[in-house]
Image: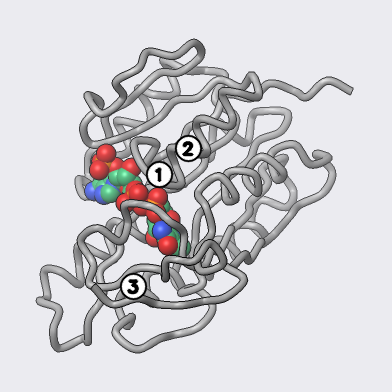
Amino acid sequence: MPTIKRTVLVTGASSGIGRAVARLLLQQGHTVIGTSRDCRKFTHPMERFSSVQLDLSQLTELPQKIRDLQQTFPDLDAVVFSAGVGQFGSVEEFSYTQIEALMTINFTSQVFLTKALLPALKRKANSDLIFIGSEAALKGSRKGAVYCASKFALRGFTQALREECGKSNVRVCLINPGMVKTPFFEPLNFEPGDHETNSILPEDVAKAVSYVLSSRPQIVIDEINLSPLNKVVKFK
Ligand SMILES: NC(=O)c1ccc[n+]([C@@H]2O[C@H](COP(=O)([O-])OP(=O)(O)OC[C@H]3O[C@@H](n4cnc5c(N)ncnc54)[C@H](OP(=O)(O)O)[C@@H]3O)[C@@H](O)[C@H]2O)c1
């Protein structure tokens, strides 16, 4: 049976997991709309790829951005929420502004985007909302208070949303990776160990996204957890 071609919005398509997802879906013949705060990062024009500038920290702009986007791309029927940031430290090390900013990007903006996207997605025959959570959505860890809180919140949101969408044709999935080898770690003081068993590749997460998208429309893959074979954290 030929794979149904989808029109997929990928947030954070300029780097890491989002970039790998965009590439794989394009290879598979889907149409991709990739977002970044700076679309000049998309240097190679590609067939079936369009870019859209989107800054998740600008919450009040998001509803209008989504209205414009859905007008330009009326076939949009799937979203991969990959944009997000990592910031780690004890609560006392975070400023109030940093706490608010991290929750805004990793959680509140995802809720705003979902609310804006849902009415049109519910009118499609089938649609998918795929969120990139984290192992930090499953277990709190030292120095992870705010990051884990943002990902736990996202997990609660997706579980409730999955119930909310059960009667429509909107499927909701949360993918929780452990450490993935991406630029996520560049501003941090730690990264996965050097051995290939110490990290997941962004392409592995992209394959999980593709699996969810191509699954039989009558089933929902609620959640996927994937982690490196041997978790090793290396401090820089
Ligand atoms: N890497 C890991 O080990 C790992 C593990 C578990 C979960 N995750 C999660 O996976 C997701 C993707 O992470 P990654 O590893 O791919 O990181 P990454 O390589 O640093 O990519 C992050 C992406 O988020 C976008 N972004 C950041 N701030 C944004 C903002 N204010 N507005 C709009 N876009 C913004 C960036 O786009 P621009 O800078 O171009 O705007 C970039 O495309 C995140 O949610 C992260 O929490 C990562």
Instruction: First in sequence, mark 3 or 2: give its number.
Output: 2
Q: Amino acid at mark 1?
A: Leu
Quadrant (top left, top right, bottom left, bottom right) of the C terminus: bottom left
- In the picture of the structure, the residue carrying the numbered disc 2 is 117
- Note whether 113 is above or below 151 in the view shown: above
Quadrant for residue 101, please give it.
bottom left
Q: Secondary structure at mark 2?
A: helix
Q: Are marks 1 and 2 in contact (CB under 8 Å)?
A: yes
Q: Report x, y in % for residue 108.
A: 34, 58
Badge 1 marks a residue whose secondary structure is helix
Q: Which residue is drawn at the image coordinates 72% and 40% (left, top)?
A: 169
- The CA distance from mark 1 to mark 2 is 6 Å
What is the spatial separation of the Cα atoms under label 3 and label 1, in whole angstroms?
20 Å
Residues marked 3 and 1 touching at CB (< 8 Å)? no
**Residue occupied by mark 3:** 147
User: Which residue is at the far right?
Assistant: 1
Residue 56 seen in this snapshot:
no
Q: Nearer the viewer, residue 45 or 104?
A: 45
Q: Nearer the viewer, residue 181 or 153?
A: 181
On-image quarter of the N terminus: top right
Q: Position of residue 217 (x, y in %)?
A: 80, 39
Image disc number at residue 113: 1
Which residue is painted at 46% across and 77% down in the image?
232
Check the image and report above or below for 117 versus 200. above
Circle 3 or circle 2, nearest the eye: 3
Indicate left or right for 169 with 130 as reference. right
Compared across the picture, whether 208 is left or right of 83 comes to right
- With respect to residue 136, does 176 lie above or below? above
Label 2 near label 3: C-beta < 8 Å?
no
> Residue, x 51% and y 72% (percent of image)?
135
